[in-house]
Amino acid sequence: MAKISFLGLGVMGYPMAGHLLKKGGHEVTVYNRSPAKAAQWVKEHGGKSAPSPREAAQGADVVMMCVGNDDDVRSVAYGDNGVLAGLKKGAVLVDHTTASAVVARELHTKCKEKGVGFVDAPVSGGQAGAVNGQLGIMCGGDQADYDRALPVLNVYAKMCARIGGAGAGQLTKMVNQVAIVGLLQGLAEALNFGKQAGLDMDKVISVISKGAAQSWQMDNRWKTMVEGKFEGFGFASDWMRKDLNIALAEAKKNGAHMPGTALIEQYYGRISAAGHGRWDNTALMGLLAK
C-alpha cells in the first residue's frame, strides 16, 4: 500500500482516484478546486480530502494530477500552495492532464531540482475507460520514475507504456487525438452518405464493422451519430479542440504537415460557436446532417 494523492476530480479523475482506493488498496487523499466535489468523493469512496494541492501532496509517495490544460497544471503545481511546495524528496509526480510537451519538460526539470520524480502520463479511453479502469496510459520521463509509478498506474490501466523521455507521453497523446479526429470525420461523412442514400445503417454497419473499416469509434459511436445524439456522454468537443490546438502548435515546431487536422479543428470551432462545445466529439456528424 502506498500513500497516494489525486488532484482533479473531473469526469476522468473522479473514478480513477476511486480505483486507487477501492481496487488498489492505497491510502488516498484528494484535492479539487471545488471542495464540494472532493467532499462528495470522500463520502462515496472513503479516504480524505485536503484544502490545497500542497497539503494534499505532503507525505505522499505518488501524486497524480488530472486537470484541464497547461495553465491549470501550472496553477496546481507551482506557488506556495502548489504541489511542488508539499512534495517530499523521492516522491513521484504523475501528470495525467492532456497538456503540452513544453509544460511536461518544464515540470520534469522543476521536479528534478527538488529531488522529485516526474512522469507525464496522459490517458486514452474516455470516461468509460476511467470508470472501468481500462485506460491506455502513454508515459514520458526517466525510466526509474516510471518504474516507481507503474504499480500505481496499473490499477486503472488496460495498457501502460513508457514511450521515452519527458514530454514523450504528451506527444503520443497528440498522435492519438489526431488519429481519432481523422477517424471521426471519415466515419461522420460515411454515415451521413449512407443515410442520404437511404440505406439501412444497422445492416450497413453489421457488414462493414467486420472488415477493414472497423474501429472503436464505429463500434461504440455509430448509432448515436446516426441518431444525432451528442449529449451526456463521451469526450467533449471543446476538449478535443483544445487537444488539437496543442498538437497543431507542436506541428509548427517540428515541421509536420497536418492539413486535415487543421480543418477538423475549424469544424470543432463551429460546434463551439453554436453553443455546443460540451457535446461529444462525434458532433462532427451534426455539421453534415440535413
Image (cartoon, grey):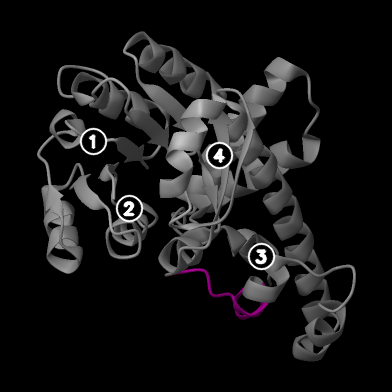
- Side of 101 where 54 appears, left or right: left
Q: Nearer the viewer, residue 134 or 102?
A: 134
- Residue under the image location 73 percent in, 18 percent down: 254
Badge 3 or badge 1: first in the primary sequence: 1
Please say if the residues under marks 4 and 3 sit with CB atoms less than 8 Å apart.
no
| Residue 98 visible in this rendered orientation of the protein | yes
| Position of 207 relative to 142 (above/below) | below
Report the residue marked by disc 1: 60
Please say if the residues under marks 1 and 2 sit with CB atoms less than 8 Å apart.
no
Q: CA distance from mark 3 to mark 1?
A: 45 Å
| Position of 177 relative to 139 (above/below) | below
- Residue under the image location 59 percent in, 75 percent down: 228
Where are the magenta residues, as a range? Answer: 222-231
Q: Amino acid at mark 1?
A: Ala
Q: Secondary structure at mark 1?
A: loop
Q: Secondary structure at mark 3?
A: helix
Report the residue marked by disc 2: 10
What secondary structure do most residues of the magenta stretch adopt?
Answer: helix
Q: CA distance from mark 1 to mark 2?
A: 21 Å
Q: Position of residue 257 (x, y in %)?
A: 81, 28
Outermost residue toward the right in this view:
212
Q: Amino acid at mark 3?
A: Met
Q: CA distance from mark 3 to mark 2?
A: 26 Å
